[in-house]
Amino acid sequence: MAYENLKMLVAGMSGEIYLTKVLKSGLMGETRRIATSDCLRATTEWFMKNEKKMIAYEHNSKGKKPYLFYTDNPEKAERILNILKEEQCIVRPNNATYRKNRVVEKNSTTFERRKDGNFIR
């Protein structure tokens, strides 16, 4: 594999980051390597070396502007995590109420959200 032809891609199903060639069809080539932990380690080291606390990106394809934060302070990390886990209650048009990782429908049936984002009873 020539270095110039390599790309870092996120797999749609597994969520792993791969170092791979992209075929003309747009799919990953058969020769690939999982690089998730390398990417996370390099990102953390980049924050530390450059003394950065936050970076933001331009809007992505879904119209959202993602932010990435870094701290080595456990108390701050816990506060940030609590903010991100904050319970939000949204009433949808079908009268289902969404709370945290659960959906409680009008008839009080509870569904739990799985890690893949789908709901189970």
Image: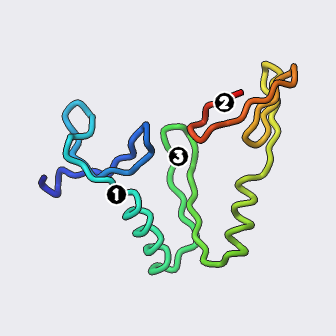
Tag in front: 2 or 1: 2
Quickly name the residue at label 3. 59
Contact, CB < 8 Å: mark 2 with mark 3? no
Q: Earlier in the sequence, mark 2 or mark 1?
A: 1
Residue 35 horizontal side relative to residue 31, left or right: right
Mark 3 and mark 1: span between their CA atoms? 25 Å
Q: Amino acid at mark 1?
A: Ala
Q: Position of residue 14 (x, y in %)?
A: 43, 42
Contact, CB < 8 Å: mark 3 with mark 1? no
Q: Position of residue 48 (x, y in %)?
A: 49, 78
Quickly name the residue at label 2. 119
Q: Residues within 10 Å of mark 1 (few under 14, many from 20)?
A: some
Quickly name the residue at label 1. 35
Residue at 56%, 39% in the rendered image: 63
Residue at 70%, 64% in the rendered image: 80
Mark 2 and mark 3: span between their CA atoms? 28 Å
Contact, CB < 8 Å: mark 2 with mark 1? no
Residue at 43%, 73% in the rendered image: 46
Q: Secondary structure at mark 1?
A: loop
Q: Earlier in the sequence, mark 2 or mark 3?
A: 3
List the single residue furthest toward the left: 2
- Number of numbered markers: 3
Residue 25 horizontal side relative to residue 99, left or right: left
Q: Position of residue 85 (x, y in %)?
A: 73, 53
From the viewer's perspective, is residue 103 above or below residue 48? above
